[in-house]
Amino acid sequence: MFVGTGVIPYILCLYPGRMMAMAVFQNRHLLNIPLVKPIHLIFGRCLLETLTASIVLVVFMLSLHLADVDIVPTDLATAGTAVAAAIYFGVGVGFLNVVMCAIFGPYFMVFFVISMVILYIFSGVYIPTSTLPEEIRDYAAYNPLLNIVEWLRSAYYASYDSEAVNKTLVLALASVSLVLGLIGERILRGKFFG
């Protein structure tokens, strides 16, 4: 369950963030329909990837349940908000990725995937951050994925302090990414999303 609580936030962030970026490029032919605008493609992919991430979560949890692993968190509300924050962060980053891919092309996704892997490595999935040297922990505290992992683990383990999780950082980064993505889509609509 320890590894599962670390992998779930990664999956819930990566899928929407990665797949939303390609929404306009993969469905450009739909823009020939007069009623369809790029924002429709983006929101459609957002909904699809949110549902896909939710289904992956349910399948993962059912698999653990069938393997006789206790999947019920001690604090269901905290677990729910952590999962919602992970999806929100993925969607926010996904909106920003749409704009970045419009500007830099689909090769921007290489940068995104590499950055997500780096965030994953330093998110405490396999090694608790409490075992890291203090200097590294200070920098790792700015990793949004680490904060989401700690947030979810605080719902399962009493030893994790949910007050130490920087929820504001996660929600602020997700919100800023979402707003920048929406503003960028509006500005670039006639240039890149034509």
Image (cartoon, rainbow, N blue to C red):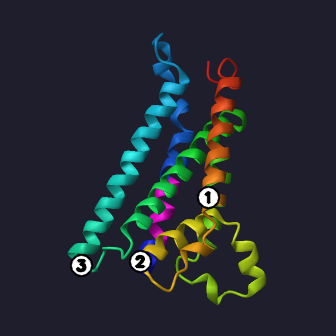
From this viewpoint, is residue 105 visible? Answer: no
Farthest residue to the right: give it.
135
Q: Is residue 26 above or below residue 1?
A: above
Magenta region: which residues? 6-14
The residue at which mark 1 appears reads as 170
Question: 148 or 61: nearer the eye?
Answer: 148
Instruction: Out of 61 and 108, give the one closest to the viewer.
Output: 61
Asked whether the beta carbons under mark 2 and mark 1 sit within 8 Å of each other, the answer is no
**Decide: marks 1, 3 in contact (CB < 8 A)?**
no
Residue denoted by label 2: 156
User: In whole angstroms, how far apart are the C-alphas of marks 1 and 3?
Assistant: 32 Å
Q: What secondary structure do most residues of the magenta stretch adopt?
A: helix
In the rendered image, residue 184, in percent from the top left (x then y), is placed at 69, 31
Nearer to us of marks 1 and 3 is 1
Relative vertical location of residue 19 with respect to residue 142 in this rendering, above or below: above
- Near mark 1 (Cα within 10 A), the count class, few <14, some 14-19 or many ≥20, is many
Q: Is residue 38 above or below residue 88?
A: above
Instruction: Determine the image quadrant of residue 100.
Output: top right
In which quadrant will I find the C terminus? top right
Local crowd at mark 2 within 10 Å, few (<14), some, or many (≥20)?
many
- Disc number at residue 188? none
* Front position in the image: 115 or 35: 35
x then y, percent, for residue 4: 41, 74
Spot the residue most to the top. Answer: 34
**Mark number for residue 67?**
3
Q: CA distance from mark 2 to mark 3?
A: 18 Å
Residue plotted at (37% across, 49% down): 52
Asked if the magenta segment contains residue 62, the reply would be no
Picture residue at 30% right of the left edge, 67% below the top: 61
